[in-house]
Amino acid sequence: MEVNKFEDVFEGKLAKNEMVEPKDWMPDNYRKHLIRQISQHAHSEIVGMLPEGNWITRAPSLRSKVVLLAKVQDEGGHGLYLYTAAETLGISRDELLDNLHTGKAKYSSIFNYPTLTWADIGAVGWLVDGAAIMNQVMLQRTSYGPYARAMVRICKEESFHQRQGFEIMTRLAFGTEDQKAMAQDALNRWWYPTMMMFGPPDAESPNSENAMKWRIKRETNDQLRQRFVDQTVPQVQYLGLTVPDANLKWNEAKKGYDFSEPNWVEFKNVISGNGPCNKERLAARNKAHNDGAWVREAAQAFAKKRNEIYVAA
Amino acid sequence: MSDNQGPVWEIFLQKKAGQPFVHCGSLHAFDKEMALQNARDLYTRRNEGVSIWAVPSNAIVASSPEDIGPFFEPANDKVYRHPTFYQIPDAIGHM
Amino acid sequence: MLKQVQHDIKTLSNLCEKPLCSLRLKKKNKMTTQDALFQYTLRLGDTNLILGQRLSEWTGHGPFLEEDLALTNIALDITGTAKSLLEYAASIEGKGRTEDDLAYFRNDRQYFNAQITEQPNGDYARTIVRQAIIDCFDFYFYNELAKSKDETLAGIAQKSIKEVTYHLRHTSSWVERFGDGTEESHNKAQTAVNELWQYTGELFEMNEVDAVLIKEGIAVDLNIVKAKWEKHITELLEKSTLTKPENVFMQTGSRKGIHTEHLAYILAEMQALPRMYPDAKW
């Protein structure tokens, strides 16, 4: 078959809402876009373990400690599902990790913000996971089979995460004065960074067009952002807290809230390495990887001695 | 020695005794025992299975998309392989 | 402020009643079964809690992703067991304290975890060796405790057996990989064995608490566990080409609430938030 014919088959699959599978022919750009998107997503899960893991040893009750442990572990599992999905596109785990460790690959800028108080763990679960879920639900129907299947599994597991965060916020918001203040402070600091998670405004989003065409993405950044605000404001009101946005106002005509845009200059800076924790996060990942090198070597040597040789794919 | 994450394994889970093993995902492991343990820790955290198969990825042979025609379409016209092809007299009932 | 001071006094007086003072009083008054059971359950709960705390320091920092998740599973099981045990301890005590009061409002001198559990994680070989030593102990210990006449302890033990059996399989396979892997991994594992061995004696120490409860068919005779543990760990080390240390001078103290310097730091970190806001519920 000629390339044109391959392309017709590929386009036909997209048109019929069918999945593209690893061995199917796909345009180079599609493959590259997927590798970039899936690995960014995977890196975000892995780096995301750090700000939340930061509070495991300090969780204020045994119940909250086991719940947080289980949650952070889930994030690791999600990163792993996604890495293996990316690997089906012909890139190895080693390369993927190298890209993260050298700073070549990006991850969600939200994880470059610090978790300063226990309420931040609530805010991360409630807002950050809430925002992530909106993206992820949409991606369960994405066009690349292994990615879609990973997302189905992730969404199923993720459903407890947002509730876990909201439960922490509820206990704080209806707790002592100090606790309520802690909750409001966390909301103030996490509101805008969470809004940034949906990416730049549609007009300035360079990768959106192809992503929509290929069904790698199914809703635009601005659509998702609007939905997030509309969904979250009533939850803020329930908690008796205040959204840190003087311009937030219900717009009857569009049946949604008007709200202030996040600071996109800050966004660009955090993405390009100038956020409050970029250096710590990368350093922590590099340290874990480097400290683990002798462990992996030992495992490899042991397998070899036992004649268990499998060619590393 | 080269640093790497070990070979890729494909993991199949049996949900309940008696049911078929179904592919649930992949992982990295350096040896057989590790592959089994990692599969248990990664893919059965929520009671998803009672039995695990772990297979080195490179041991799997897969058909290609181009094979769809020659592999699977010839089966389309062999209706006589299905029980509905045959008529059983009413008097016999279920067979 | 006044409220906080009152709370502190209340907490302090609670703490002074037990377990410190009861230990001092025991020479005059014979220890009751209830006292002993409280102490015993506390000892088991503390051991699991501190070990779980140490293991969870690895979450997000493991040597590779799959193993990071595996070790976190172990941390989860162990912290869960700690929660059940401290809940039970609180109910035995019957003074309205919860498992969180016990975890977050006792000082290091009121903690009875085995000293080996509070030792720093060190490199991955040290964490794995520490864990294998304890898993092996727990495996035989919980198999005995499952026969306890105390139904709650027996129930907790039965649940733990399954978890611990898997932990032991996981950590044993890593001890083997390290011992018989590279020279570097072998040396790291051997160093860990050599340095941790001094804390193994304590695991088998018995005091009046054990004596009272063994008579009632509640507690485990640790001499039985010791024989099985020694056999198993010796075989594991041999299989892993590691050398078992001989004639090691054993550390002691945790049965009396005496610890290494590490525990106070662990507690300072773990307890900071509840102690900063003693009136808060989380």
Image (cartoon, coloured by chain):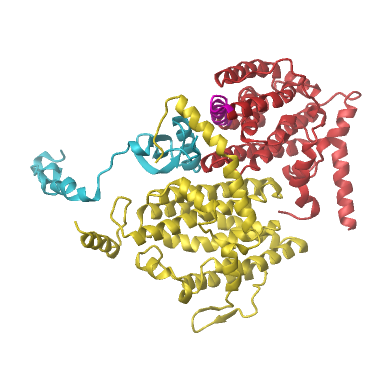
Chain colours: A yellow, B cyan, C red
Quarter of the view holding residue B16: top left
Of C12 and C214, nearer the camera is C12
- Residue A16 colored in magenta in the image: no
- Residue visible at 44% across and 70% down in the picture: A206
Tally of numbered tags: 0
The residue at 54%/60% (across/down) is A108
Residue drawn 45% across and 60% down?
A: A137
The structure residue drawn at horizontal position 56% and vertical position 27%, both measured from the top left corner, is C172
Q: Is residue C114 above or below residue A35?
A: above
**Quarter occupied by the C terminus of chain B:** top left
Q: Position of residue A118 (x, y in %)?
A: 69, 56
Vertical position of residue C221 compared to residue B68: above or below: above
Which residue range is magenta in the image? Answer: C164-183
Q: Position of residue A253 (x, y in %)?
A: 49, 84
Q: Main secondary structure of the magenta part?
A: helix
Residue A37, relative to residue B81: is it above or below? below
Q: Residue furthest bottom?
A: A253
Q: From the viewer's perspective, is C133 left or right of C215?
A: left
